Image (cartoon, rainbow, N blue to C red):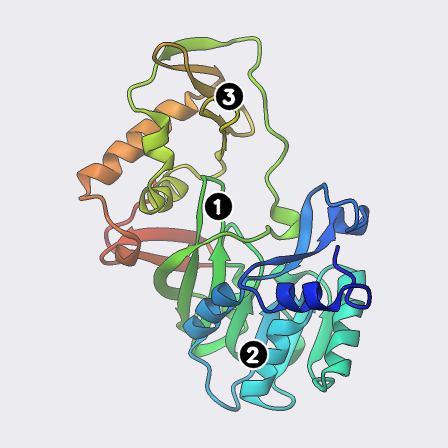
Amino acid sequence: MIDRDADASTWEKAVYSDISIVTQIDDGATSLSEGDGLYSSSSSMPTIVAAELGLLGLRADDDVLEIGTGTGWTAALIHGFVGDGRVTSVEIDLDVHRQARANLERAGHDDVRLVHGDGTLGFSGGQPYDAVHVTVGATGAAPAWVAQTRPGGTVVFPWMPTWRYGAFVALRALGDGTAVGRVASGCSFMMMRGQRPGELRGLGDDVRGRQARIDPRRITGEWAASVFLNAMLPGVVCTTEHDGGFVLWAHSDTSAAHVAWEGDWVVRHSGDRDLYGEAEEAFLRWISWGCPDIDRYGYTSTPEGDVVWVDHPGRVVNP
């Protein structure tokens, strides 16, 4: 933790650096001075903030809904552009919400409407909005965000499913609960409180082993491939370890897989699914589709669920 009063120069350097600054750990249960734990709130990197705000396509006098107030910084940036009485920001954590209010009041942005609540529900009291700006990772577009957006308006959120990497998704609302758009660029954000992946599921008693068909470093090293795998493997969490050699873990509610070098790449898996086998098949399908890069992916959100596609909405990736 950097104390502005005790070390003003270090504080100023951190604030003006292109880094993310952690502002809460373990939902406030752990002091920032301790430094260890689950990062649960932060001020994002300025370049990432600029990238997402650029996707919103804001105009003066737009009405904007923000999900995840955090420090209040991005709400202030949006307020400075669209004008007074145009910004509503929702924060689930009461302490963060209160601190943001104090920050915004000190900075002269006290007419930003701050709501303490669940961001997945949006805020119907200010709809319709011209744009929805989401500052926390989500596994998909919440139906409320789309429903509360004017036809033609934008919804931009960090799509953070569970396979390795995430990406910004920029959608345009059609006015019927549906929104269509594109996967824009890679990103990584803290997850929404109710969508955090569960604890790593270890291998069970029914372990089976086999030789891997594909080097796991190849599957996890392609950001564009991860978009494909995220769509093909919903709910499958992928993590990697590097200390003492590369290790891949994958787990779902019912199954787990472990891939490590044992003179060759060996897969050990348990449960009702061979998760790494599914990942290998998805990766090969990505190759068979011409290794589409991020700029070829599209995204459609409907009340029934979301789909990812390549090149045009008819070429759906999801199984």
Q: Which residue lies at the image location 70% right of the left edge and 67% below the top edge?
A: 9
For disc 2, the marked residue is 64
Residue sitting nearer the eye, 238 or 204: 238
Query: Percent x, y for residue 279?
Result: 36, 30
Whether residue 175 is visible? no
Q: How far apart are labels 2 and 3 at the CA level? A: 48 Å
Position of 108 compared to 273: left or right? right
**How dense is the environment of label 3, judged by Cα within 10 Å: few (below 14), some, or many (20 and up)?**
few
Query: Percent x, y for residue 94?
Result: 79, 62
Query: Percent x, y for residue 270?
Result: 50, 15
- Which mark is nearer the camera, 2 or 3? 3
Counting residues from the start of the chain, the first of labels 3 and 1 encountered is: 1
Q: Amino acid at mark 3?
A: Gly
Counting residues from the start of the chain, the first of labels 2 and 1 encountered is: 2
- Quarter of the image with the N terminus is bottom right
For disc 1, the marked residue is 161
